[in-house]
Image: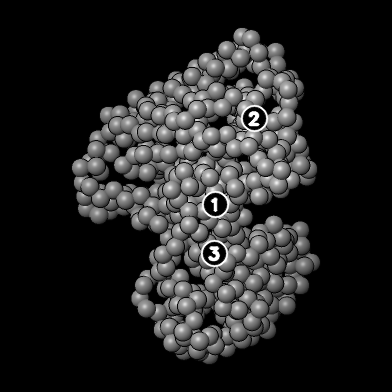
Amino acid sequence: MTTSTIKPTGGEEVPPAGVVGGVGDVADVGVAASLTKRDSEEDTWASKGYNYINPFVHRIEIDSHIEVAKIYVLTVLLLPIRVVGCVLSLISAWMFACIGLYGMTLDDLKAKPLTGWRKQMQCMTARGMRMVYTFGSFHYVTMKGRAATAKEAPILVVAPHSSYVDSILVVASGPPSIVAKRETADIPLLGKIINYAQPIYVQREDPNSRQNTIRDIVDRARSTDDWPQVVIFAEGTCTNRTALIKFKPGAFYPGVPVQPVLLKYPNKYDTFTWTWDGPGVLRLLWLTMTQFYNRCEIEYLPVYTPSEDEVADANLYANNVREVMAKALGVPTSDYSFEDVIVMSRARDMKIPFPGDIVEIERTIEKLGLIESQRDAELCKNFLRLSNTDRLDIITFGELLQVDLKNTNLHKLFALLDHRRAGTVSLKSFLLCSLFCKLKNSDLLTFLRALIHIYSESSQQIDRESFVRLMRHAGGKLNEQKAQALFYALDTDNLGYISFDSFAELTEKQKSSYKFLYHKSEHIRRPKAVTTAEN
């Protein structure tokens, strides 16, 4: 993992600028809509205690005083010009798209490829969008390899997917079609431009969205019409380019030849990688547009023609193409997947320590045999009677878990939890992580019930302070003010305490208001993995 932040002369960190949600892969657009990428330069979501390849964590470090001064000077002198240029270029692209789309509906765009003057106007729209990137500092786009025709490879498999600027591929070549959420058609200015690329739209409200989208990709790929190639970012989410995570099989179901395409950004500073845990999009835009220029490299690898086995097994096909691309990039492949981002996001919302490491923690706990064990539940019951639980050394930690001190996975787990590298860990942090890993697919009420003894001696006498602390883990739905109001509503006799059962009964009666406590997150199940990265 790269380390943190832009540090000006005095060592002060630049304050967070903001964040905007991203677009995921075709198969998970509905789930992706519930995820947010947060500017976490101030809040470290991942541990620093154990080094491993975590593809979802990104930091920027610019320690040079000269570079920092340049950023602030260009913010005043160059940034306004670039913003105006980007806006004017976007408006010109929108105008070309409006002209080209005149008299056409979304159904018309889906029915057949554009031809004649409409096709020419589509290319003009792409040039207008290319100017947006030019004004945005991407003056240089280097093309390597030979771009295949749509007949040779109907699908372009692109990786690594790391940034909002990856769409430069679409405007710099073709332009090909994309896979997008149906809602993007309604975005001011951009909606028309996206429509004009004849995308394959994903209908999130449609329960058959996944099957319908795959069918549309198959139909396009096997069509005899002159459709443009379909671009698919096979990883399904943004990573930091340190490894290629698992490819989603959507691009490989048609069983047709694909052309792997690599995206590289050979620049001094990486100011545009937008991951789950890292700087927000507005900060990245600011830092990107206050560089004199940025480079992008697009490399077309030879067309990959699937074998009979690969045609029959889309996952095998996806893995083999990923291996080819990883070798060309000189990076390892990783067992991480888009589903792991969902796990991390749920852990973050439930205030679990080190959500950025929770997948690695879960895998380590599995190897220690603690997922099936009841040791964490036993420690929970006695937690408030144990002493010095915030500063356990490795020997005490191993004794409490009843794990041999020679077990290398014990040391790995200890390092993951030792986020300050102080040589000690918190038992509470371990218990929260362990119980989350066991119960992440259960409803929140079950999880909260498992945590009671961390905060209260008895489930029948939970005081207000303990209840508020417990409710912090209710997925962000019950803040301190709401939790206190709920406590007073339950404590009708002014006893100063309530029981968990009375809380459960109330939420059951008012289930429409507390349905989030009963929702099971079955979609975050993921297959067990024994490694996080392999060379």
Q: Are marks 2 and 3 in contact (CB under 8 Å)?
A: no
Provide the residue designation for mark 1.
245
Estimate the x, y position of residue 88 in percent, counting from the top left.
Answer: 45, 20
| Mark seen at residue 531 | 3
Q: Is residue 79 left or right of residue 470?
A: left
Distance in Å between CA atoms under marks 1 and 3: 12 Å
Which mark sits nearer the N-terminus, 1 or 2? Answer: 2
- Residue at (53% x, 69% y) in the render: 361
Residue 356's x, y, as percent?
Answer: 50, 61
What residue do we see at 59% from left, 37% from top?
Answer: 304
Q: Which mark is drawn over residue 154? A: 2
Which residue is rendered at x = 50% and y = 27% of the image?
146
Q: Quadrant of the N terminus?
A: bottom left
Residue placed most toward the observer, 311 or 128 = 311
Amino acid marked by disc 2:
Pro
Label 2 or label 3, whichever comes before in sequence order: 2
* Label 2 secondary element: loop
Question: Residue at position x 76%, y 72% from top?
Answer: 505
Type of the residue with mark 1: Ile
State whether residue 351 appears in this view.
Answer: no
Label 1 element class: loop
- In this view, the residue in front, 48 or 189, is 48
Tag in front: 1 or 2: 2
Looking at the picture, which amino acid does disc 3 mark?
A: Thr
- Marks 1/2: CA distance? 23 Å
x, y percent for residue 117 = 61, 9
Q: Secondary structure at mark 3?
A: loop
Specify the farthest residue to the top: 117
Residue 510: percent from the left, percent from the top? 76, 63
Marking on residue 14: none
